[in-house]
Image: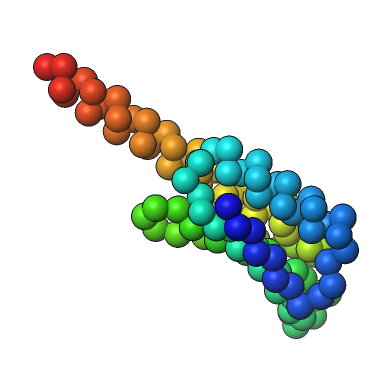
C-alpha cells in the first residue's frame, strides 16, 4: 500500500512516521486499501487563530473513503480524522459481513 502525505508546512520525520503508522493501523479494518492520501491545509478564520484541516482519502474497490477534520494543530486534526475514517471502515466492514451472512442464509433455504 502506498501512503502519500502532503502539507503546506514542514513535517518532521517523527510526525511522518506517526502518521504512516496510524494509517497502517486503519488498514487493519480493510485489507483492500491500495493507497492512502493524507493532506493538511492551514487557514486563518476571521477573528480566530490559525486552524489546520487534515484530510484522509483511502482508495479501496468501490467508492473512495474520504474524511476531514479541523483542529488548532496538525496532529489534533489528524487524530480526529483518523477516528472518523476508522468508524467509516468499521461500518463498511459490518455491512459487508451482514450482507454475506444474509446471502449465506438465503442460499441455505
Tell me residue 72's x, y (percent): 80, 64
- For this orientation, the residue located farthest to the front is 1
For the residue pair 36 and 97, the one nearer the viewer reads as 36
Q: Position of residue 31 (x, y in %)?
A: 51, 41
Q: Nearer the viewer, residue 1 or 85?
A: 1
Q: Residue 25 lies in what quarter of the image?
A: top right
- In the image, taking residue 40 as reference, residue 72 lies left or right, namely right
Report the residue at 58% width, 38% height from top: 28
Q: Does 108 sit left or right of 35 as displayed?
A: left
* Residue 67 visible in the snapshot: no
Q: Position of residue 57 (x, y in %)?
A: 55, 61
Give coordinates of residue 93: x percent, y percent: 44, 37
Residue at 75% from the left image edge and 62% from the top image edge? 71
Residue at the extreme top: 108
Q: Is residue 103 above or below residue 10?
A: above
Point 36% across, 36% down: residue:
96
Image colouring: rainbow
Amino acid at each position: 500500500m502506498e501512503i502519500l502525505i502532503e502539507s503546506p508546512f514542514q513535517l518532521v520525520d517523527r510526525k511522518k512516521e506517526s502518521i504512516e503508522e496510524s494509517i497502517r493501523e486503519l488498514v487493519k479494518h480493510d485489507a483492500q486499501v491500495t493507497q492512502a492520501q493524507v493532506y493538511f491545509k492551514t487557514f486563518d478564520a476571521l477573528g480566530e487563530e490559525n486552524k489546520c484541516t487534515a484530510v484522509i482519502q483511502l482508495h479501496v474497490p468501490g467508492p473512495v473513503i474520504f474524511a476531514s477534520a479541523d483542529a488548532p494543530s496538525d496532529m489534533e486534526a489528524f487524530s480526529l480524522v483518523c477516528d472518523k475514517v476508522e468508524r467509516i471502515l468499521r461500518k463498511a466492514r459490518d455491512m459487508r459481513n451482514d450482507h454475506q451472512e444474509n446471502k449465506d442464509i438465503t442460499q441455505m433455504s
